[in-house]
Image (spheres, rainbow, N blue to C red):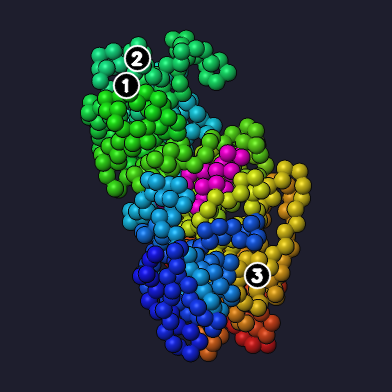
Amino acid sequence: MRTLHPFTEILDATGAHLTPDATPSGWYIRTAAELQVRLDDFPDGLICRVAPGADPDVVQLGIGPATSTLCNALYSPRQDEALVFSADNLAISAGDDGTFTVACSGPLCITRLASYLRIHRNLPWFTPLDRHVFRRAPSGWCSWYEYYLAITEEEITHNTDWLAEHLQPYGCDWVQIDDGWQGIGKGYGSNRDWFVTCTDDFPHGMRWLADYIRKKGFRPGLWLIPITQSDSTLFATHPELFARRDDGTSAGEILWPVPNVLPPDDDGKWVTWPGRYYLDPTSPATASYLRRLFTMICDDWGYDYIKIDAQGGMCDEYQRYRRLLHDPSLDGPRTMRTATQIMREVMGPDRFLLNCLCDFTSAGICQGIRIGGDIDLRTGWEGLQPAISSTMHWLWLNTIAFYTDPDAVCVREPLTYALAFLWVTLVGITGQLLMASDIMYNLHPDRVKLLQWIFPVADIHPMELYPLDTNRQPGIFDMKVRVPHLPAWDVVALFNWSPTEIQTVALTPTRLGLCGESWICLDAWSGELLHVGDGQLTVEIPATACRVVSYWPALGRPQVVGSNRHLTQGADDLATVAWDPQTLCLAGASHVVGKAPYRLRIYVPDGFIVTTPQVTQHGPIVEIILERNENTLVSWEIAFGMK
């Protein structure tokens, strides 16, 4: 039984100090009085839930030290420890100094969940994500979807030029080249030689292309499957590099035709999709090989973002051939971690390593991990399901263990506009890794605006630290924004997952875990005022579509209620906002994107009038429009009078 407790002080309503009783699972405070419990030793703590609440349709996310009346737990990634509080009238709040206060009506039961992710959520390799270098998940472009293997140097440069003009000002930082740059031939077995560049399609070579991308203001990325090879000569002359069967054949060759799974390779044989020859990561020769490969890609060529594919399932493959590996003492997961750790060591901490697909044994090594299968735009709604379901199941890991990658964001047809809006909204409001993957210069301007609304990835963390229900998918994603010097607000994305039925969603402050009596609600995309008052809002959503609304606590005077810049409605673009009650002026500064009209929305309650000229007013909503030629911080001010 643990006797020490982590609480700085426990006070009842009279200010008397209380000492909790230790229990087998935590602590118990025996009082019926009002309580305040303060914790100072949870500097990285997150206010959260570790199990679904009474309303499983509501998913909470946070920017900054966000709080909610629905939350009943604190989690520290550094300590991998959760504290769950059970009492009446429970409220957990966060101070700006990293302290937490738990207020309630006693008695109070506190359950300690040690090794929460490692044991309770079955993630034995968990290490808290180090965000010192990459404060947010990458935002960029990937060549895979639509080009697939038919990518060329010319198309990379064409898209890079377009991105530099249309998405880079919004926060697009990366250009990642996917499958097709390497090897000889197009078969899945023959084009896995990572030391050979396909010169027909990439005549200037990979160093030249990385330099081109960098000169355009981006950081270059590259896809590969480093644990496979297609060089038959290397396989024959260096047997110490490879995993083999008892008869000496490659573990990557399929012994019987599988015509409905993969086409035959260039020589008419069937091989596994990752490649014909599997490396043996337990061999010292393979360690040298991987160091040479990653030194070439990162140091010689200059790529800073590496997407390693075909990791899912390889643990099982290495486990199957474990007795034939150089070091059979390593099981499948440890064999894979051995290879991934070598890659990480060569790359260093300043480059981004993305593991694709769903191999959580690389947790603590890779900053990003792909969490689901490939999307397929050709099948529309059904083709997005792998990304939607994986988001439901693994979102609780995002920013805590690694950045989750639900797969690329595409907005082109055949997706309807409504479905494209749903897809960008889901990725944007969850703060997951963001890679656009259309032929960008072919996009209609309306589709481009959808992408601009979610670049860059916002600094969002999950507040539901458990897998969401993938069968009954929740449809209310409530992002709670708390940034310095501004009142808190909520951005709520409402998803209709039904492919046929219109849905009506009823929102209330209580349902969203909000405190307050009066609210201003807007459509976050259009800026339309939807409701002023008690916060009870009913929204109708067509099939396979979504709406995004914002909730602002009414302050009784003119106040900012969002902008058109980003889905977050101001988390990054609003630098300062201040109200002067003496002069009746609202002033601040906003980060604007060059050559893009920035629309700042201000709510003007009854009793006030706008005295500043040249503003656009739609009822009680006033818009200030700011335009500059370059990205910059712009100060603004609007004056009011009393009626």
Q: Secondary structure at mark 3?
A: loop
**Residue situated in front as seen by the camera: 151 or 611:** 151
> Which sits earlier in the primary sequence, circle 1 or circle 2?
2
**Position of 563 relative to 318 (above/below):** below
**39 within the magenta span:** no
Q: Nearer the viewer, mark 3 or mark 2?
A: 2
Residue behind mark 1: 324
Q: Quadrant of the C terminus?
A: bottom right
Numbered disc total: 3
Residue behind mark 2: 246
Magenta stretch, residue numbers: 384-407
Please tell me which residue is depicted at 30% across the width and 16% down the height of the picture. 235
How far across and how far down the image is residue 217, in percent? 37, 47
Distance between mark 1 and mark 3 Cα atoms = 61 Å
Q: Determine contact: label 1, label 2, CB under 8 Å.
A: yes
**Position of 180 relative to 143 (above/below):** above
- The picture quadrant where one finds residue 319 is top left
How far across and how far down the image is residue 358, in percent? 46, 39
Distance between mark 3 and mark 2 Cα atoms = 65 Å
Q: Secondary structure at mark 1?
A: helix
